[in-house]
Amino acid sequence: MRNTTLCYIRRGGDVLLLHRTKKERDENKDKWVGVGGKFEPGESPEDCLLRETREETGLTLTEWRYRGLVTFVSDNWGTEYMHLFTATGFTGSLRDCDEGELCWLPWETLPSLPIWEGDRIFLRLLDEERPFFSLKLRYEGERLAEAVLDGKAIL
C-alpha cells in the first residue's frame, strides 16, 4: 500500500496538466493527470505535495487546499491512498518534467482527454466545490468496477 499526492494547479480558467509519456512502466502511461507523487519517509500529505510540485514543475505552491482522499484498489497496481489537492497560488517558472509534458489547458477540456474513468468522478466533485470527501475507486484492469463516495456506492 502506498500514499501519494495529486494536485490540480489552477491559473484563471486553466489547469496545469502532466501528459504522462516518458516512463515505460507507468500506470498512468499516456494519461493526463495533475502533478504529484509518492510520499517519502516521514512526509505529511502537505510535505509531499510541496516537494513533488517543486520537483515536477519548478513551481513553489503558496496557496492550496486539501480536497479529499481517493483510495484506488487495482488488481494490477495494488492499493493506493491518493491525497487530492487543488492550488491557486504559486511562484516560480515551469521547467521540463522527466515524467511527461506539462501543459496549461482550459479546465473544461480535462474530461475529454485520456484520463482514468474514476478521475471524472473526483473532477466533478472538485467542480461542485464538494467539501472534503473520501472516494474509493476499484479497478479491474483499466475498467472502473466500483465507486464508493463517503461510504455510499455510486457505481
Image (spheres, rainbow, N blue to C red):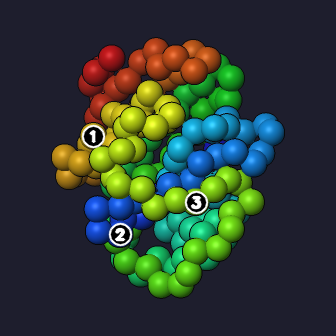
Residue 43 quadrant = bottom right
In this view, the mark in front (3 or 1): 3
User: Residue at (72%, 39%) from the top-left corner?
Assistant: 26
Asked if one can make out residue 45 in the rendered structure from this viewpoint, the answer is no
Q: Is residue 121 above or below residue 98?
A: above
State how far apart marks 2 and 1 are (Cα).
18 Å
Under mark 2, the amino acid is: Arg
10 to the left or right of 48: left
Classify 10 Å Cα crowding around label 3: few (below 14), some (14-19), many (20 and above): many
Image quarter hosting the N terminus: top right
Residue that label 2 marks: 11
Under mark 1, the amino acid is: Arg
Classify 10 Å Cα crowding around label 2: few (below 14), some (14-19), many (20 and above): some
Image coordinates for residue 111, horizontal then vertical, percent: 37, 38
Circles 3 and 1, Cβ within 8 Å, touching? The answer is no
User: Residue at (68%, 63%) from the top-left corner?
Assistant: 97
Residue that label 1 marks: 124
Mark closest to the chain's N terminus, 3 or 2: 2
121 to the left or right of 44: left
Image coordinates for residue 148, horizontal then vertical, percent: 34, 26
User: Residue at (33%, 34%) from the top-left corner?
Assistant: 121
Under mark 3, the amino acid is: Leu
Image coordinates for residue 14, horizontal then vertical, percent: 35, 61
Residue that label 3 marks: 102
